[in-house]
Image (cartoon, rainbow, N blue to C red):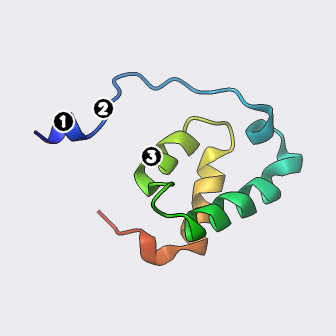
Amino acid sequence: MFNSQVDVREEFIPEKCELFESEVYLEEVSDVICIAQAELPSLLALNQLAEALLRVKHGPWLLCQLVANAPDSFEQG
C-alpha cells in the first residue's frame, strides 16, 4: 500500500537547467524557492522538492538554504 502512494524511482538521473547550474542566479532561485514553499506549502511538498533539488547541480546547496529558512518543516530521521 505504501509503494502505491509514493513514486519510487529506481534510477537517479541528474537534470540540466541553466537556471540551477549558473552561480549567478543561485541567491535569487533560493529566495524564490523559500518564499514559494513558505507561502504555498500544499503545492510544494517538501519531499518532492528535496528530490527535485538533488537532481540539479547546486541542488544540495539550495536544499540547505531551504532547511535554514524553514527548520520547523524538517525532522531528523
Q: Is residue 27 left or right of residue 61?
A: right
- According to the picture, the residue beneath numbered tag 2 turns out to be 8
Q: Position of residue 3 (x, y in %)?
A: 18, 35
Tag 2 or tag 3, which sits nearer the N-term? 2
Q: Residue at x 45, y 46 (%)?
A: 48
Above or below 53: residue 68:
below
Q: Position of residue 63 (x, y in %)?
A: 58, 56
| Disc 2 element | loop
The answer to whether the residue labelled 1 contacts the one labelled 2, judged by CB atoms less than 8 Å apart, is: yes
Q: For residue 5, what is the image quadrant? A: top left
Mark 3 surroundings: few (<14), some (14-19) or many (≥20) residues within 10 A: few
Mark 2 surroundings: few (<14), some (14-19) or many (≥20) residues within 10 A: few
Measure the alpha-carbon separation of dots 1 and 2: 7 Å
Measure the alpha-carbon separation of dots 3 and 2: 11 Å
Give the amino acid type for the residue marked by disc 3 in the picture. Answer: Gln
Q: How many marks?
A: 3
Above or below 55: residue 62:
below
Measure the alpha-carbon separation of dots 3 and 1: 15 Å
Q: 33 and 58: which one is in front?
A: 33
Q: Position of residue 4 (x, y in %)?
A: 19, 34
Please give the label number shown on residue 3.
1
| Disc 3 element | helix
- According to the picture, the residue beneath numbered tag 3 turns out to be 48
Tag 1 or tag 3, which sits nearer the N-term? 1
Give the amino acid type for the residue marked by disc 1 in the picture. Answer: Asn
Tag 2 or tag 1, which sits nearer the N-term? 1
